[in-house]
Image (tube, rainbow, N blue to C red):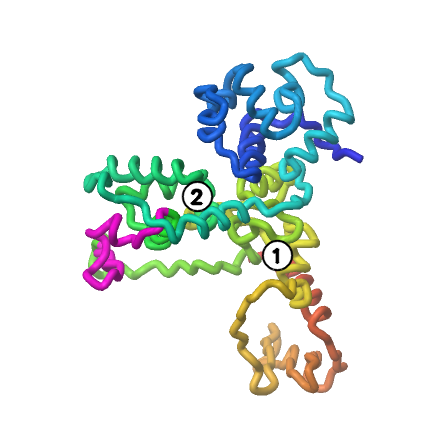
Amino acid sequence: MTTKDKYPDFQMAIRWHAIKVALLAKGISLSSLSKSSGVTGIASAGNRNYPAAQTEIAKALGVSEGTLFPERYDVVWNDELQAKIESTLPELFGLPVTVPARQLFTDLMKKHSGSPIDLEGLPIEEPARLTWLKAALRNRGFVLISLTSHLGIRRSALDTLGSTRLDNLQQLVARCLGVRPEKIWPERYDVLGRPIPKVRSRAKGPENREPQVVYRLDLTKGLWLPVRDLVGLPGMATDETFIEHRAHVQGWQMRQRFGVNEIAFGSLPEATKQYLLTPTALGAEESIVRSRRRLSGPVSVEATGKHEAASVTVVKVDVVDKAVHLQMGVEGDLAVLNREQVSLLAAALIDASQEIPD
């Protein structure tokens, strides 16, 4: 059975991205494919007809050239080709992936972290130093985008590493090369190997100006989640680009805040909502340590009506005998909820709150 989204209808840009992700899942980058095949400039096949490159890409993915690039081979699309491409590029269609794409990167990082690279030829000035580091990573078999994907940040962060200090990315690059980060960027670390604090410049403006308070977790418009935090969850792809593409196609609510793309919780697939809200959705293999704020006693939610002088208890919440007791009003009916029921109620309240006018 095939999906209703036909491969030739997708824009070439998103198809090309899917092809590169599929190659990466097999541990193959475009540059490594060029080296092994002897075909130069394979990356240019994304925007022009390049038969030699298309043949090597198709061979690496185990399909025909016409399956990947149908418009370049006058292919008449059919259900058989659709089924083949869905199994080759599953995330393009929002289908589950059998092998985690990040596992190859993790295995490669473990392999090289104990093998220090020779830094004798490392330039001390930028951008020559960053160019040298990128070449060294490629020579060790790393696909550059896999580093930033591993950290959940954009690919452009690596391109600005020469002028912008990013401690977590510096540590990851150094680990992939088997050395300490201070050996690569000595000016960014003290003698004990600790990152030197950044010096922040004062914002210009009147001294009496009131500071603008902006919260990074903004619930005034409902619950929004960064795309990077949704990668790999049930119902989600293992790549930010695929998630964003699916959000646009299916009309999910999206916004950008602090330079981060976010999706409204209410727009997420049910499988993702259940995973995020239901404790039992966490797999036993995940070693996640969570700090929880426990109730030391009943908590009351109070409200004041238009014609009331004093506040009135609307809901009283308590934990009794490993269950949540929910009482409406002071002497209202009592509901006893388990964890799953609490999760479903929380999801319903969040969805309903988005309908309330500001």
The C terminus, quarter of image: bottom right
Side (left or right) of 187 relative to 327: left
The answer to which image quadrant residue 162 occupies is top left
Residue farthest top in this picture: 74
- Residue 293 vs 216, above or below: the answer is below
Q: Which residue is mark 1?
A: 354
The answer to which image quadrant residue 147 occupies is top left
Q: Amino acid at mark 2?
A: Arg
Side (left or right) of 105 relative to 286: left
Label 2 SS: loop
Q: Amino acid at mark 1?
A: Gln
In the image, the segment drawn in magenta is 177-200
Q: Determine crowd level at label 2: few under 14, some 14-19, many 20+ residues with C-alpha closer than 10 A.
A: some
Closer to the N terminus: mark 2 or mark 1?
Answer: 2
Q: Which residue is mark 2?
A: 154
Residue drawn at the location 54% of the way across and 48% of the way down:
103
Residue drawn at the location 68% of the way across and 67% of the way down:
280
Q: Nearer the viewer, residue 147 or 198?
A: 147
Q: What numbered label is drawn on residue 125?
A: none
Residue drawn at the location 56% of the way across and 25% of the way down:
57
Membership of 27 in magenta stretch: no
Q: Nearer the viewer, residue 197 or 208?
A: 197
Q: Nearer the viewer, residue 262 or 271?
A: 271
* Mark 2 → mark 1, Cα distance in angstroms: 29 Å
Label 1 SS: loop
The answer to which image quadrant residue 352 occupies is bottom right
